[in-house]
């Protein structure tokens, strides 16, 4: 058995999650592969058996399920780790992970099991959020290239957290990038991102609302973001329209129409009608202008309500991303 810290430190060995596919899909340690001891249905039957007949009968039932699959499980584990060295976990570090550990050791594998299982990892992640991180929160109206700036800061050796990337969502009605993780797994991804960072050094992060698409930022992280130094990025409307057209130009007209329809009640009937008409005409810039009018108003209201004042107000109009990054790094040194 290994503590969560030691388990994560052993980075050369692949991580295997032996829980059911349903448990894995809801949330897992980032990077783990799913090699379930039981199917979803089998796990349900095992639970019923434990409640009504006790542990001895559960062991017999479990063996009846996995017995015919033992060889295949070893073969599947070999595909995950050619050098036969794996890390294993289940829900609490109990029978499932230890059973697979026994099987794989018998087959010549080196194994380590996470003490406390996935439950221990979840606690470790939540405790990680409580760390007094030195956040630098970057805000600004839509179309100010904040994500691009964050990525460029990272390229320059700066620490950063990409919340929208982890959430697989750009943070607006137009931000859908595909299937999002569950909030539970978003927290797992966020914890894994923070684990890689040095808490004694500043970390750049984009200002976001509590909800990004369908996932929620942990309350303690959101509170830390609100209390962090605030950098407000400004840019001309024309440049922001160009940025938005570039970002959403690959989307289908149907998807863009759906995005406008999702905010129809707040946008208003006439604005929605005009935006849909512009899209029909292939006039993406004017459709984006309407979208920016709505989001600028909403963000300005949010800022006014929060009472936050920028520690740095930076206009990046006619400024290259490299120049912006240099200015931000220089400001950080002086702050």
Image: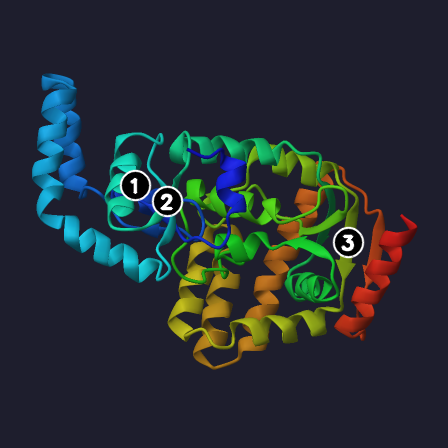
Measuring from the top left, give residue 138's x and y in whole percent.
72, 52
Q: Name the residue tied to disc 2.
A: 111
Residue at the image position 68 percent from the left and 69 percent from the top: 240
Q: How far apart are marks 1 and 2 (CA)?
A: 6 Å
Instruction: Give the camera-side residue of 157 and 26.
Output: 157
In this view, 36 is above or below 48: below
Q: Distance between the residues labelled 2 and 3?
A: 49 Å
- Examine the rendering and report whether any part of residue 51 can be seen: yes
Q: Which of marks 3 and 1 is nearer the N terminus?
A: 1
Residue at the image position 35 percent from the left and 58 percent from the top: 81
Q: What element carries label 1?
A: helix
Q: Distance between the residues labelled 3 and 1?
A: 52 Å
Q: What element carries label 2?
A: strand
Q: Which residue lies furthest to the bottom in this view?
A: 282
Q: Earlier in the sequence, mark 1 or mark 2?
A: 1
Q: Which labelled disc corresponds to residue 101?
A: 1
> Is the C-beta separation of discs 3 and 1 under 8 Å?
no
Measuring from the top left, give residue 12's x and y in whole percent.
48, 55
Q: In this view, does 206 lie to the left or right of 83?
A: right
Q: Name the residue tied to disc 3.
A: 232
Q: Residue furthest right?
A: 334
> Is the C-beta separation of discs 1 and 2 under 8 Å?
yes
Q: Earlier in the sequence, mark 2 or mark 3?
A: 2
Residue at the image position 47 percent from the left and 75 percent from the top: 279
Place residue 63 in its image quadrant: top left
């Amino acid at each position: 058995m290994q503590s969560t810290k030691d388990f994560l430190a052993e980075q050369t060995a692949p991580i295997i999650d032996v829980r059911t596919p349903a448990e894995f899909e809801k949330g897992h340690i980032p990077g783990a592969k799913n090699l379930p001891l039981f199917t979803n249905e089998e796990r349900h039957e095992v639970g019923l058996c434990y409640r009504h007949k006790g542990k001895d009968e559960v062991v017999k039932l479990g063996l009846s399920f996995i017995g015919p699959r033992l060889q295949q499980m070893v073969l599947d584990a070999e595909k995950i780790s050619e050098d036969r060295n794996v890390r294993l976990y289940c829900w609490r570090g109990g029978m499932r992970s230890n059973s697979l550990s026994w099987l794989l050791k018998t087959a010549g594998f080196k194994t380590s099991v996470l003490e406390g299982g996935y439950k221990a990892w979840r606690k470790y992640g939540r405790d990680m959020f409580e760390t007094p991180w030195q956040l630098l929160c970057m805000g600004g109206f839509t179309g100010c290239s904040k994500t691009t700036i964050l990525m460029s800061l990272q390229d320059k050796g700066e620490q950063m957290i990409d919340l929208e990337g982890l959430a697989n969502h750009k943070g607006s009605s137009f931000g859908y990038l595909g299937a999002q993780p569950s909030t539970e797994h978003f927290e797992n991804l966020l914890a894994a991102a923070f684990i890689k960072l040095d808490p004694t050094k500043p970390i750049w992060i984009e200002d976001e609302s509590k909800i990004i698409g369908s996932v929620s930022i942990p309350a303690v992280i959101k509170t830390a973001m609100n209390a962090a130094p605030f950098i407000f990025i400004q840019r001309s409307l024309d440049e922001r329209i160009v940025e938005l057209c570039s970002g959403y130009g690959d989307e289908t007209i149907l998807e863009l129409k759906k995005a406008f329809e999702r905010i129809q009640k707040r946008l208003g009937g006439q604005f929605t009608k005009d935006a849909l008409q512009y899209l029909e005409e292939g006039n993406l810039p004017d459709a984006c202008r309407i979208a920016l009018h709505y989001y600028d108003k909403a963000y300005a209201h949010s800022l006014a309500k929060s009472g936050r004042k920028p520690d740095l107000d930076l206009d990046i109009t006619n400024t290259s991303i490299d120049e912006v990054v240099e200015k931000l790094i220089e400001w950080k040194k002086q702050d």
